Amino acid sequence: GKISLVSRRRASPSAAPEPPGSPAEKDVTVRSAHTDRKKYVSNETVQIYATIDNRSDVPRDVVVEARVRDSRGRMTVLAAPDTGLSVDLGGGACEPVTLSWNTGAYPPGPYSILLSALDTVDGSVLDERKITFSVAPAIAVEGLKLSAGPARLSANETGTVGFTLEFQ
């Protein structure tokens, strides 16, 4: 026999009936999305992991894309592959996907990724999730003094040179 999935929606007695097309009615969802870390430095690769879920019993072709935006909300770049990642979701299937983006020479600060599952046929957004991460500035230490000792060794002497770092 066929199992009905009606019970998957948690209904509370006071809830109004949901209009069609509301999130609970979505067939294809981005079940989870996260980056491998929350903080990166310049020229590091951000790994973006997501799980795309097909709740219907009809196979769906989906394109997953990740748009990286800076703190001012400007579009910076599409994560690789920049054409998006094609996913063939069988009925009831759940597929993990991985995209990546290199922080390159982008300025430090907070960034967000909008990860979208798009319908391959008409390009409509089936579901999306936002992830945030930050790019840390290269570390500059003010008032750093480096000294080596002993200062001189004659040609036939062997000795150990010690380095001292002082923070002021």
Image (cartoon, rainbow, N blue to C red):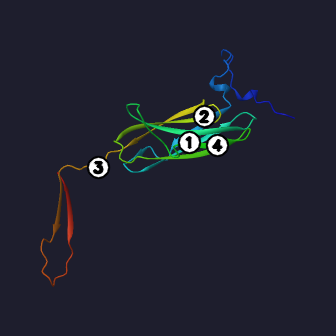
Task: Give the image location of residue 134, x and y in percent.
Answer: 40, 41
Q: What element carries label 2?
A: strand
Q: Residue at x 60, y 32 (%)?
A: 123
As helix, strand or loop, the secondary structure at mark 4 comes to: strand
Could you say which is closer to the camera, residue 85 or residue 162? 85
Residue at the disc numbered 1: 84
How far, Cα to Cα, is label 3 from label 1? 34 Å
Q: Residue at x 65, y 44 (%)?
A: 95
Check disc 3 and report the residue beneath it: 139
Please tell me which residue is depicted at 55% across the width and 39% down the height of the picture: 65
Q: How crowded is mark 3: few (under 14 residues within 10 Å), some or many (20 or more)?
A: few
Give the residue type at disc 2: Leu
Question: Disc 3 or disc 1, which is closer to the eye?
Answer: 1
Observer-side mark, 2 or 3, equals 2
- Residue 143 in the figure: left or right of residue 112: left
- In the rendered image, the vertical position of residue 110 relative to residue 101, given as above or below: above
Q: Distance between the residues labelled 1 and 2?
A: 9 Å
- Callouts 1 and 2 close, C-beta under 8 Å: yes
* Left or right: residue 127 compared with residue 77: right
* Sequence-first disc among 1 and 2: 1
Residue visible at 74% across and 27% down in the picture: 7
Q: Is mark 3 on a helix, strand or loop?
A: loop
Q: Name the residue under label 2.
A: 118
Mark 4 surroundings within 10 Å by alpha-carbon count, few (fewer than 14), some (14 through 19), many (20 or more): some
Bin the neighbour count of mark 2 within 10 Å (Cα to Cα): few under 14, some 14-19, many 20 and up: many
Q: According to the image, label 4 marks what residue?
A: 87
Report x, y in % for residue 62: 64, 38
